[in-house]
Image (cartoon, rainbow, N blue to C red):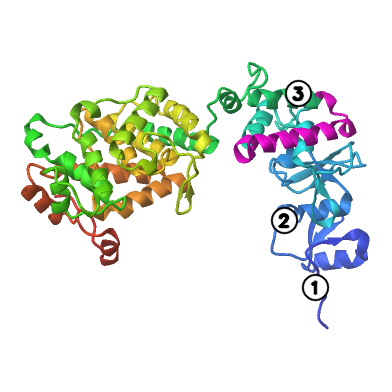
Amino acid sequence: MAQQAYPALVFASEVDRRNLSRAQAQGRLVRVASGIYSGDIGSTAESLSRRYLWPIVAHEIPGAVIVDRSARDGGLGGDGTLYVVADRSRPLVLPGITVTPRRGAPALPGDMSLPYGIYVAGEARSLLENLTPSRRTAAGTRRTLTRTEVEEWIDALLASRGVEGINSLRDQARQLAPALEREREFAALDELIGAALSTRDASQLTSPALRSRAQGQPYDHDRLDAFARMATSLAAAAPDVLPLLPADQSRRALLPFYEAYFSNYIEGTEFTLDEAAEIVLENAASQQRPLDAHDVLGTYRITSDVDELRRTPQNGNELVELLKARHAVMLGARTDKLPGAFKQQPNQAGSTTFVAPDLVEGTLLHGFDQGASLTSPFARAVFLMFLVSEVHPFVDGNGRIARIMMNAELARANEVRIIIPTVYRLNYLAALKAATHTGNDGALIATLAFARRWTGRIDFSDRRTAEADLARTNALRDAQEAEGAGVRLVLP
C-alpha cells in the first residue's frame, strides 16, 4: 500500500497528531516549528520557514499586515524579524526568523493584498509608520527605519516618480494619518518632502542624498556606490607607472592621430586609415560622410592639443566644465547631438541603463569626490574613464569623451596614454560591463593596463612604422572575426 505523500505545509491543528508523529519518525515529514511540518524532506527547517513565510503567517496570524521596517523590504524579513500588525501579542518564532506583532490599524486603503489573506502596508502608510522612532533591539536592529533611511527612501521615490508621484503619496499619507494616529509623523513627512522639493528649510536633513537633491544636485545612489568601490579597488592595486621617455619623443609623433582614429572606430565611426589620414592629416573634407569626418577631426583636435590635454579637473565643477567644453569641440558639427550640453532623455546600451538626465550633474560632482584621494595618474585615469562612462552624460560621444578624460590624466603626468585598438574592442567593453554589472573592477583595471603597455611599445613615428606594428600585433583585425578565430592583441 502506497504511503501518503504530504504537501509543502502541514499544520498540526488540521490533521491527526499521531499520524504526524509517525510520518516524522519515518522521515516523510520535516518539523519546521511547533505545530508546523513540511513534506519537503530535502530542505532544512530554516529554508522552509523562509520559503513558506507568508502562508505560515497567514495560517498562524490571519489578516496580519506587514508593517514598519519589514514593509520597506517587501515583507521578506531580511534582518531575521518580520514586523506585523495583528490582534496578538505573542511572537511567532520560526527557524531563522521571528514574526513580531504589535497592535495597530488593520488593512487600510492603499495596503497591498498578498496571497493567503495577509497584507503589506502601502508606501504612504509605511512612510508614516516608519517615522515613529524606535529603539535598537538586543540583536542590533530597529522596528522602524532611521530618519536617514526614510530620507533616502524619499529621495529614491523622487528619482523614480518625480514631483507628481511624491505629492500623490503625500496626499495619501495626509488622508491615512488620522486612522493610524500618526498626525505628528505626517507633519514630519510633510516637512521632509517640502525640504526635498526646496519649498521648506532643508538644514535639518540628515541624508546626504536628499540634502544634495534639495540643493538642486540629486545623484544616482547606486552609481556612487560603484564609484566608491572602484576607487577602493584602484587604491589597493599595485602602482602602475609607465613614464614617457624624452628619447621616445619622435616615436609619439602620430599617436594623437591613431588615438582619435581608434576611439571613433570602436564606436562605429569607421574609416580606413587612408581615409582618416586624408581627413585629419591632409585636412581633406569627406564628401560622402562629412559629419563622421568631423567626429574624427574633432577628436583629433583634442588628442593633439598638448596644452588642452594637460588640463585636468581638480574638483567636480571643473570636471563638468571640461566635459562640456571638450564635447562641444568633438561633436561640434552634430547639432542634433547637443554638443556641449548634457542629455535631456535617458540613454542605455544593451542591458546597461545609464544615469537619468536629472541626476547627471549631481552624480558627476559627487562621483568625482569618490576618487579625489587617488594619487596615481593611472588610477585617476581609470577612475575618470569609468565615472564618465557610467554616467553617460551626453546624447552621443560618451565613450570617446571618457577616453579623452582618461588620457588627459596620463598626459598631464607625462605617462604613456591608452589606445583601444579595433581588435581589443570586445575585451574593453566586456571589462566595462563586468565592472558595471558584477563589480569586477580588477578586469577593467587589467584590461586598460595591458592596452597601455601595448600603446607604449608601438612606434608612432610615421604611418609606415606605426601600421607595420599595428598589423604585427593584430590591432587592425575586426574584433568579432578575431574572437571567432582565436586571434588576440599581442605586444610588439
Which secondary structure lies at badge 1? Answer: loop
Side of 182 relative to 431 (left or right): right
The disc label shown at residue 51, or none: 2
Please rate how many residues cluster around mark 2, counting C-alpha atoms within 10 Å: few if below 14, some from 14 to 19, many from 20.
few
Q: Dot 1 corresponds to which residue?
A: 5
What whole-number distance in Å separates the C-alpha atoms at marks 1 and 3? 54 Å
- Look at the image and tell me whether residue 420 can be seen: no
Residue interval drawn in magenta: 157-184
Percent position (x, y) of residue 450? Answer: 25, 45
Which secondary structure lies at badge 3? Answer: helix
Which secondary structure lies at badge 2? Answer: helix
Side of 247 relative to 18 (left or right): left
Quarter of the picture holding the N terminus: bottom right
Residue found 23% across the figure and 34% down from its top: 302
Residue type, mark 3 in image? Ala
Side of 479 relative to 431 (left or right): left
What whole-number distance in Å separates the C-alpha atoms at marks 3 and 2? 37 Å
Percent position (x, y) of residue 239? Answer: 29, 32
